[in-house]
Image (cartoon, rainbow, N blue to C red):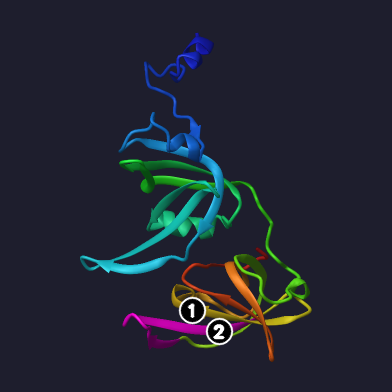
Amino acid sequence: MEDKARKQGVAPGGEGRPTRRKLSVQQVSGAGIADGDTVDIEDSMYRIFNKLRFEKAGVARISRVAVFGGEGSSVRATFWDKSAEMIDAALVQRKDRVVVTNMRVKKSGDDTELQSTASTYISRLVPARSAVTDFSQLKGGEKNIDVSGRILSVNPIRFFRDLSGRDSGVADCTVTDGRMEARLVLWGSSSACTADMHPGDYIKAEFVSAKLTDNGMEIVASDSSRLLLSRRPV
């Protein structure tokens, strides 16, 4: 009876309730998935962006954008509040293979996006471990790389008005791989992360660039980057 139910796509003993498969990015973008459907995703985490804090109707909110899939096949997802925080708490990192449950589908023409729900949960299946952990490997000129180290010191954020007239910020900190030190320069949303930084914390800076200056190696994080802070190595 149970084997027959599984073949028909019905949960055993579920009285006709359909089972929900874990879908890849290509599958969730397919014609069989409708606007408003709730799906589970199993795929690679292509990009993660920094959390954004804002206030709506007097309530503090958090959002963050992530992208599942890879070059040529990807889906943008927006995570809200506890789901946005969960990505950091679970130490989910760029290029990890992950499972994300209870995501709502938003379709507009040929475009597909995902939104977290109150019951969204995310976990790592296969850690990527692709970060540069030896600063001597950095020669300068690298782009879109991930770098991990430990924070030695943090300088306060400085605010300014950017070329488009918006308020923005810049900050910097010193990080080490245990042998070498490098200056990590933080622009835009990355600069706001200094509020949660403490000397001794571990940090992973994703989608950053590196350049060699007269004062040594400099790593640059921007609005396109993501910073992950942890009490243990990441």
Q: Residues within 10 Å of mark 1 (few under 14, many from 20)?
A: many
According to the picture, the residue beneath numbered tag 2 turns out to be 172
Specify the amino acid type for callout 2: Asp
The x, y position of residue 209, in whole percent, is: 61, 72
Up-down relation of residue 105 to residue 62 (above or below): above
Residue 207 at x, y = what percent? 57, 65
Q: Main secondary structure of the magenta part?
A: strand
Q: Image point 71% across, 82% down: which residue?
A: 181
For the question of whether residue 230 can be seen, the reply is no
What is the crowding at mark 2: few (fewer than 14 residues within 10 Å), some, or many (at least 20)? many
- Residue lying farthest to the bottom in this orientation: 214
Up the image or down, 206 lies above or below 15; here it is: below
Q: Amino acid at mark 1?
A: Trp
Which residue is nearer to you in this view: 90 or 28?
28
Name which residue lies at 20% across and 65% down: 57
Among the 4 quarters of the image, the one containing residue 135: bottom right
The percent position of residue 161, horizontal first and vertical second, equals 36, 86
Span colored in magenta: 158-174
- Residue at image position (45%, 19%) is 9
Residue located 32% across and 41% down the image = 107
Q: Secondary structure at mark 1?
A: strand
Is label 2 in a helix, a strand or a loop? Answer: strand
User: Which of disc 2 and disc 1 is earlier in sequence?
Assistant: 2
* Horizontal relation, residue 91 to residue 86: left or right: right
Q: Residue furthest left?
A: 57
Tell whether position 160 is magenta.
Answer: yes
Residue topped by disc 1: 187
- Verify whether residue 232 appears in magenta: no
Residue 100 x/y as whole percent: 49, 44
